[in-house]
Amino acid sequence: MSDKKIILVGENNLTRSILAEAILKKIFRQKNITNVEVISRGLIVLFSEPISPKAAAVLYENGCEEVTKRSSELTQEDMDGADLVLTMGKGETDHIREHFEVNTTCMFLGTFIDMEEEIPDVMEDNKEAYEACFDLMRQAMEAAADRIILELISP
């Protein structure tokens, strides 16, 4: 059983939040951190969809495991068990606070790692766009992992 649970929330849980989940899991695996559960969710998921094959290819090529992930909607049950909730966009944090009972730290990823701008979602359906998003997300998740380890796991 995990000691800590981190939720990464995107608008529809098809790109950024899934990339963030896969990258953070890989970082924790590389650091032999096994007591943290990392999941991703979306705020607007009308039905579960698989991630883009191009996103799956980028994850696979970068040694990440989430190549068959499907989108999932954020629930109050998810929130109740969370130790940290990081959103991919600034507006998503507000949405969560308005529509869920929040009993934990919930903030925009950029605020968490002192990065002012949002990582843009993939707008073009080509592998290069997913690679660019992955590279930006990897940098952000490395910074987030450092803070999570320091403040949430190590104490």
Image (tube, rainbow, N blue to C red):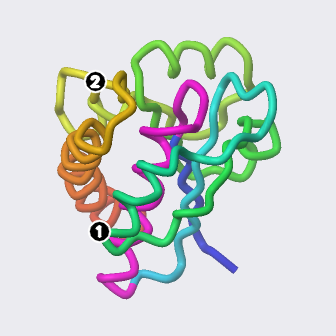
Nearer the observer, 91 or 146:
91
Nearer the observer, 111 or 21:
21
User: What secondary structure is the magenta-colored segment mainly?
Assistant: helix
Q: Position of residue 9 (x, y in %)?
A: 54, 36
Q: Is residue 65 visible?
A: yes
Q: Residues within 10 Å of mark 1 (few under 14, many from 20)?
A: some
Q: CA distance from mark 2 to mark 1?
A: 22 Å
Question: Dividing the image into 4 quarters, which one contains the N terminus?
Answer: bottom right
Q: Position of residue 89 (x, y in %)?
A: 41, 22
Q: Secondary structure at mark 1?
A: loop
Q: Position of residue 129 (x, y in %)?
A: 27, 36
Question: Which amino acid, by three-letter code, is at mark 2?
Answer: Glu
Decide if residue 38 is on the left or right side of residue 155.
right
40 to 133, vertically: above or below? below
Q: Which mark is residue 118?
A: 2
Residue placed at 63% from the left, 75% from the top? Answer: 2
Question: Which amino acid, by three-letter code, is at mark 1?
Answer: Asn
Q: Which mark is residue 62?
A: 1
